[in-house]
Amino acid sequence: MAEQGTSGLCRVLVVGGGFSGLTSAVDAAETGAEVIVIEKNPYLGGRVAQLNKYFPKMCPPMCGLEINFKRIKTNPLISFYTNAEIESISGSEGDFTVNVVINPRFINNNCVACDACSQICPVDRPNDFNFGLDNTKAAYLPYNQAMPFIYAIDGKTCKGASCGKCLEVCKYNAIDLSMKPEKKTFKVHSVILATGWNPYDATKIDNLKYGSVKNVVSNMMMERLSSTTGPTNGIIKRPSDGKVVNNIAFVQCAGSRDENHLEFCSYICCMASLKHTKYIREQNPDSNATIFYIDIRTPGKYEQFYWSVKEDSNVTFVKGKVANIEQAKGSDDVVVEAEDIDTGEKKEITFDMVVLATGMEPSCATTKVNGYKFTKEGFGIQENGLYIAGCSKNPMDVSKSAQDATSAAMKALQSGHGR
């Protein structure tokens, strides 16, 4: 039977527990609506939780996330489900039925995050939060300030009851390896799609050699390498041998503005690379950075951020598309081949590490939400009662995502007005 909610209250379901989804949820709930948040990961926070700093203020993102987490914890009108996915959305504005599958976490709310299960676990798994730059155990805490602050067990790698070591050491009866998927049905007035984005798969870009040449990483991997909670404790080291990076290249439009990949500008990539340049220059005053670009796009007030990077004598801008990337002979260094459009010179430069400014691909380009319609690129199409927030609608930065999420919340409330 579908959960009906409290009589007389507008009821909104938000698909996605990242920054946009959480902003929509708290904004709607604080006006008196009942809100349900559905998140496919075992934690809330989305991509923002993986960032080291925001631009242009260069402050840590957990500040903004913790405020939203607190607002959720203290608001009885908000409920959330992690490890959950939408099965279907049917109905019309003011009367939607949403079917949800909640996948097993294998750990219940008795968990106090004591880490005993992780310490005893014999199984290693790639750490998807750090984009595979390190490993966790099959029993793991997604990240240090995760909400909910509860461990999860990766059912794909866990050996289950045939191992059972975690069961032996857990003092709180928090582990249940027999958990099965659970289905729930909700009746709501409106739905907000805020499933966010994924870094474009750079292995599809043949000339950039991501995945085949050592020390070619994505911009989101650079975020984790720069974070004190990341795999290198914030010291920017290259993955292959742990060498501290001193000479780095940034390759813009890695997949974006390309008819063979993402036909649109991903909006944040230039700013992200400028931010990453500041990371390494502030960490290592003797370091050098080279940015290969087609156009530098820093909309509005962000232009000043660009100027501050451009004035740095240790930063070189090369206008020209990268033609090829190769492994340097006899070393783990990386060779970048590009044409400098301003001089007409073909350049071949060796770097410690290369960072690809991979574009923002909407998550629904690969995983559709049943009930919504989408553009060919995978961006959601807004209809009566079915609203879109943040990067599910267009590429945008965190600030614009917050504004857009508030707008979506206001529209969602109108669908329940007077019902």
Image (cartoon, rainbow, N blue to C red):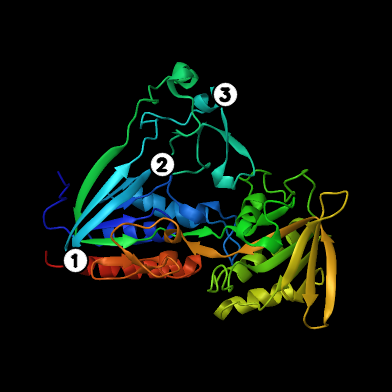
Q: Nearer the viewer, residue 13 or 198?
A: 198
User: Label 3 neighbourhood size at 10 Å, few (<14), some (14-19), many (20+)?
Assistant: some
Up-down relation of residue 136 to residue 321 (above or below): above
User: Real-space Cα distance between discs 3 and 1?
Assistant: 50 Å
As helix, strand or loop, the secondary structure at mark 1 comes to loop
Give residue 200's position: percent from left, percent from top. 56, 60
| Residue identified by numbered label 1 | 93
In the displayed image of the protein, which residue is found farthest to the top? 168
| Residue identified by numbered label 3 | 122
Of the residues under marks 2 and 3, which one precedes in the sequence?
3
Of the residues under marks 2 and 1, which one precedes in the sequence?
1
| Residue 191 appears anywhere in the view | yes
Of the residues under marks 3 and 1, which one precedes in the sequence?
1
User: Real-space Cα distance between discs 2 and 1?
Assistant: 31 Å
Up-down relation of residue 304 to residue 20 (above or below): below
Q: Residue at x 74, y 56 (%)?
A: 283
Q: Nearer the viewer, mark 2 or mark 3?
A: 3
Give residue 183's position: percent from left, percent from top. 26, 41
Residue 148 shows which numbered tag?
A: 2
User: Label 1 neighbourhood size at 10 Å, few (<14), some (14-19), many (20+)?
Assistant: some
Residues at marks 2 and 1 touching, judged by CB atoms closer than 8 Å: no
Q: Residue at x 23, y 70 (%)?
A: 384
As helix, strand or loop, the secondary structure at mark 2 comes to loop
